[in-house]
Image (cartoon, rainbow, N blue to C red):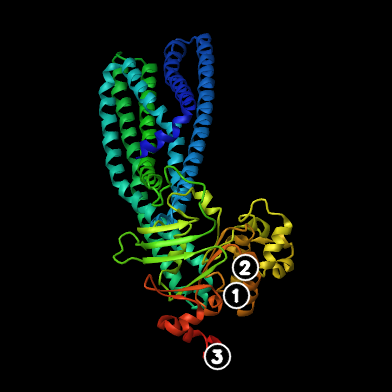
Amino acid sequence: MLLRLIGAYLRPYRPWLAAVVALQLVGTLALLYLPVLNAEIIDNGVIAGDTGYIVRRGGLMLAVSLGQILCSIAAVWFSARTAMSFGRDVRAAIFGRVGSFSAREVQHFGAPSLITRETNDVQQVQMLVLMGGTLAVASPIMMIGGIALAVHVNAGLSWLVIAVVPVLGISIGLIVTRMVPSFRVMQERIDEVNRLLREQITGVRVVRAFVRERHETSRFAEANDDLTQVSIRAGRWLAGMFPVVMLVANLGSVGVLWFGGHRVESGQMEVGELTAYLSYLMQIVMSVMMATFMLMMVPRSAVCADRIAEVLDTESSVVPPVDPATEFPTRGSIRFEHVEFTHPGADVPVVRDVSFEANPGQTVAIIGSTGAGKTTMLNLVPRLYDVTAGRVLVGGLDVREADAEALWSRIGLVPQKAFLFTGTVADNLRYGKADATEEEMWSALEIAQARDFVEALPDGLDATIAQGGSNLSGGQRQRLAIARAVIRRPEIYLFDDAFSALDLATDARLRTALRPVTGDATVVVVAQRVSTIRDADVILVVEDGEIVGRGSHHELLEGNQTYQEIVASQLSAEEAA
């Protein structure tokens, strides 16, 4: 999976990779040539006392060293540019894929895991690409060249190279196989820490309200300790790798000096050849250490690549139509035809055999107990989920056949949890209509009963909104979310319990202000409060995913027991009448 991911996203940067290989080849060959020059200086210059020869060869060594440095710098520059571009492309691909997910896929992965995959996991693979351009390319060239030149310098000591390289390879292989499982578990532990941290930051007020600081601290400490233990276990194997490499390298050096010294004494080897051979042995060891460093990164990067590929290979359960339709036969109508929806792996449908119709100029309200399936029914209209049976038609067209943008452009959705984006009030309103004028913004705010508090903000429309609207109250967030939907003047309004945080007086004023705006549009309202939906044209009473009653407030009050129980729990007999 790692090779597939790297190969796919490095394909556009082949010229840069070719430049890296060429520069590393030249730089490494220059590095391999230096011991030869050093040996010649010792044997032909120092021992012979020829100062001129030493100066000439020394100048050549300086020139070769300068070329090697320049090639290394250029190779690192191209490698860094390639790695950063690779990381950018993978992050963009993950972001695009997650943006195409339905609510089902997002729930499957979870927000903390998706964030970790988008950031930490991509960074790990990106670092591997960077190190690959600098170490992985140079390492085999240096190893093969070092072995060849060491044998060329003195074949009698070749057995030392044959002994050292396999021992290094086997030792490192054993350590790496122990590290792979630890790195996989480590990424899972990072997900868990991110999840708990996200929960505790988001729900800090709830934690404090119920005096659960110690409990949450204990939960986080447990997850943090798990991550620490796995990291320590992987770190121990990692820490043992370099000592093993250095032990083998130093033993090899001792062997070269011992046996090479005897060969020098017997006249079978020159002193310069001995120093060159020792240099090549160290270069071979250095190449193994470079490969070791890469091997240390490969296991964790492979785990990260698997997690990235899992996101990229996951197709949305909401499949785009092959030939999407952009024209809708009728304007703004909604029709459910024997609709059923079941979550994957669930035994019981959330919504079953639901049929109703809502037309322009009509307000349809959906009420029922918590978990009855009201929000799920609403989410089927903009195709956040796909039905498992039946059909949902918008404007006379099955939503599964409609172009997504054409469908969404006809809908103004106010979700159950009013979410605002970081920016200003104006920025959030322009999510509803990108080219909205200031006059249109104030008009939408007035309808949503938000004009007063926005005018009271220090910068008005330019007032800063924190992430998620955390610097506003729940009611203020809901009113801005309603204004965001109103400003686009859609054909269909979907209010998913969008008035729950408003007091009764503000709720009444807002609904009154909405009537002229939504007069020619289709309005579907999900609500818990009877006072919010009592004036709706049709009220659907939902229980266990089924419609158990439909009609006006007074009709249901007279003949539907479920609705009577809901009304009795909220209103007095006089208010209900």
- Dot 1: within a 10 Å radius of its alpha carbon, few (fewer than 14), some, or many (20 or more) residues? some
Describe residue 383's horizontal placement relative to residue 258 as left or right: right
Which residue corresponds to mark 3? 574
Tell me the quarter of the image containing the C terminus.
bottom right
Which label belongs to residue 479? 2
- Dot 3: within a 10 Å radius of its alpha carbon, few (fewer than 14), some, or many (20 or more) residues? few
Describe residue 383's horizontal placement relative to residue 263 as left or right: right
Q: Mark 3: which secondary structure? A: helix
**Please, which residue is most extreme toward the front here?**
329
Asked whether the beta carbons under mark 1 and mark 2 sit within 8 Å of each other, the answer is yes
Q: Where is residue 146? Give x, y as percent.
A: 36, 22
- What distance separates the C-alpha of mark 1 from that of mark 2? 8 Å
Q: Where is residue 58? Give x, y as percent.
A: 52, 15
In the rendered image, the vertical position of residue 491 relative to residue 498, given as above or below: above
User: Residue visible at 41% across and 36% down?
Assistant: 6
Asked whether the beta carbons under mark 3 and mark 1 sit within 8 Å of each other, the answer is no
Which residue corresponds to mark 1? 502
Mark 2: amino acid: Arg
Foreground pick, 564 / 483? 564
